[in-house]
Image (spheres, rainbow, N blue to C red):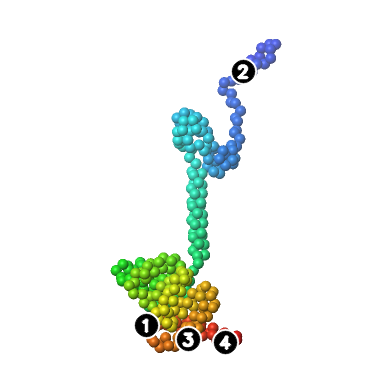
Amino acid sequence: MDARFHVRAGRPFTVHRSPFTLLPMTIPGPISCPSCGAAGSGNYCSVCGASLSHRACLACRAELSPQARFCHRCGRPVTGGAQPVRAGSERTAWIVAGALCVVLVGGIAYSVSSSAPQPLAPDMANAGVATGAPGSRPTGPAPDISGMSPRERFDRLFNRIMQAAERGDSAEVRRFTPMALGAYHQLDVRDIDARYHAAVLRLQTEDFAPARALADTILAESPGHLFGYVIRGTAARFQNDSATRTRARRDFLAHYQAEMEAKRVEYLEHKPVLDEFREEAEKTERTEKTER
């Protein structure tokens, strides 16, 4: 008989288990990841990398959750069991968020700059004696005008503003126009050419009343001067004042021949402006005669 069993008469069998008998092995079922909820086994989640094993605080032995960074009982930082994949995911999220912010700010800046109104570019706003090719952008830093005379500063700034207006650079026009007008007010002598340039600057910034006033001073000093009619006609065009514009064109044509025979220096410097204004005035006169 097997030594593990002992039979006594009239009594049931009594089974004595050997101390070396193997107990049935229990195979643990799948564990749910506390971080992402995926089924997993082992010490780490195969999906997100979170720890699946129980952790305890090294100081007070309190049981910790897999994602804990500090002990909830004693506050000690938790070491070990890092989650490299999760940390990488957080870094990636911050990088993506930062990139989206940069794109958003860039889009707003582009929208604002593209929707900004372009500066007025009146026909009479050529640079006159400006240096460089028409429409060319000045290169290098802005010139040092501190050692120039007021008239040199005014002429230099006026030319720069006219070139910026031809490029449609409204920011540069707004930046330098107050400086140019300040230089104009410092002039000891404000001749007709300087007043004409100041009127053009006023028209660039849609300051029409001072522009018309400058035209009046030109015609008061030199009756029939073509610059006065050009300023009046241009301001009237911007303000949709057809009556004043028509009167300025007619006065310009009435005085054109005599004024050009005078061979004024300022006329030679601004001849393209005068030619364009005359062509427009003559074309309008022909159209009006045809319609009568």
Q: In the image, what residue occupies the spot 49% across and 49% down?
A: 94
Mark 3 packing: few (<14 Cα in 10 Å), some, or many (20+)? few
Quarter placement of the C terminus:
bottom right
Q: Give percent across and percent down for residue 85.
A: 50, 45
The answer to whether residue 103 is above or below residue 76 is below
Q: Secondary structure at mark 4?
A: helix
Instruction: Report how far apart the C-alphas of labels 1 and 2 lie in the structure.
Output: 132 Å
Mark 2 packing: few (<14 Cα in 10 Å), some, or many (20+)? few
Q: Which residue is mark 4?
A: 289
Quarter placement of the N terminus:
top right
Q: Mark 3 or mark 4, which is nearer the start of the sequence?
A: 3
Q: Mark 1 or mark 3, which is nearer the start of the sequence?
A: 3
Q: Is residue 16 left or right of residue 173?
A: right
Q: In the image, what residue occupies the spot 43% across and 88% down?
A: 258
Q: Mark 2 or mark 4, which is nearer the start of the sequence?
A: 2
Instruction: Report how far apart the C-alphas of labels 4 and 2 lie in the structure.
Output: 134 Å
Q: Give percent across and percent down for residue 113.
A: 49, 63
Q: Amino acid at mark 1?
A: Val
Nearer the viewer's eye, disc 1 or disc 4? Answer: 4
Instruction: Report how far apart the C-alphas of labels 3 and 2 lie in the structure.
Output: 137 Å
The answer to whether residue 288 is above or below residue 159 is below
Extreme front residue here?
Answer: 220
Q: Give percent across and percent down for residue 168.
A: 46, 70
Circles 1 and 2, Cβ within 8 Å, touching? The answer is no
Instruction: Report how far apart the C-alphas of labels 1 and 4 lie in the structure.
Output: 34 Å
* Front position in the image: 191 or 113: 191
Instruction: Report how far apart the C-alphas of labels 4 and 3 lie in the structure.
Output: 16 Å
Q: Which residue is mark 3?
A: 254
Q: Which residue is mark 2?
A: 16
Q: Amino acid at mark 4?
A: Lys
